[in-house]
Image (cartoon, rainbow, N blue to C red):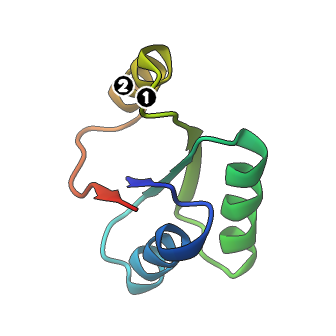
Amino acid sequence: MVTGGNKGIGLEVCRQLAADGVIFTVLLTARDETRGTEAAEKLRGMGLSSIVFHQLEITDNSSVARLVDFLKTGFVKLDILASS
């Protein structure tokens, strides 16, 4: 999971993790849903199909709770957390 994955260093971390096959799924998170979706689509357009987007505002408890529920229902565990 990469916080702030829609631009800059976060986007590059997502790209490298997905390109290197370091992990099976790269969860790109961003505050802005539109920008996050666009970033994930850009990476998938580069052939990096393991990118998944989920909206996250780390200062909003309800946003964090939604992410936790998403992780619990869709993933076995979280191996790497990168915050940008």
The amino acid type of the residue labelled 2 equals Val
Q: Secondary structure at mark 1?
A: loop
Q: Residue at x 66, y 79 (%)?
A: 47
Q: Residue at x 44, y 28 (%)?
A: 67
Asked whether 48 or 3 is in front, the reply is 3
Position of 16 compared to 48: left or right?
left
User: Quadrant of residue 77 in the image?
Assistant: top left
Q: Residues within 10 Å of mark 1 (few under 14, many from 20)?
A: few
Q: Position of residue 3 (x, y in %)?
A: 43, 52
Q: Secondary structure at mark 2?
A: helix
Asked whether 65 or 25 is in front, the reply is 65
Residue on which the image places disc 2 = 68
Look at discs 1 and 2 and give the one toward the viewer: 1
Q: Residue at x 74, y 53 (%)?
A: 35
Given the current orientation, which residue lies at the most extreme front position?
59
Position of 7 compared to 2: left or right?
right
Q: Position of residue 11 (x, y in %)?
A: 55, 70
Asked whether 77 or 29 is in front, the reply is 29
Residue on which the image places disc 1 = 59
Position of 30 compared to 18: left or right?
right
Task: Indicate the quadrant containing the C terminus: top left, top right, bottom left or bottom right.
Answer: bottom left
Q: Residues within 10 Å of mark 2 (few under 14, many from 20)?
A: few
Q: Is residue 68 above or below residue 40?
A: above
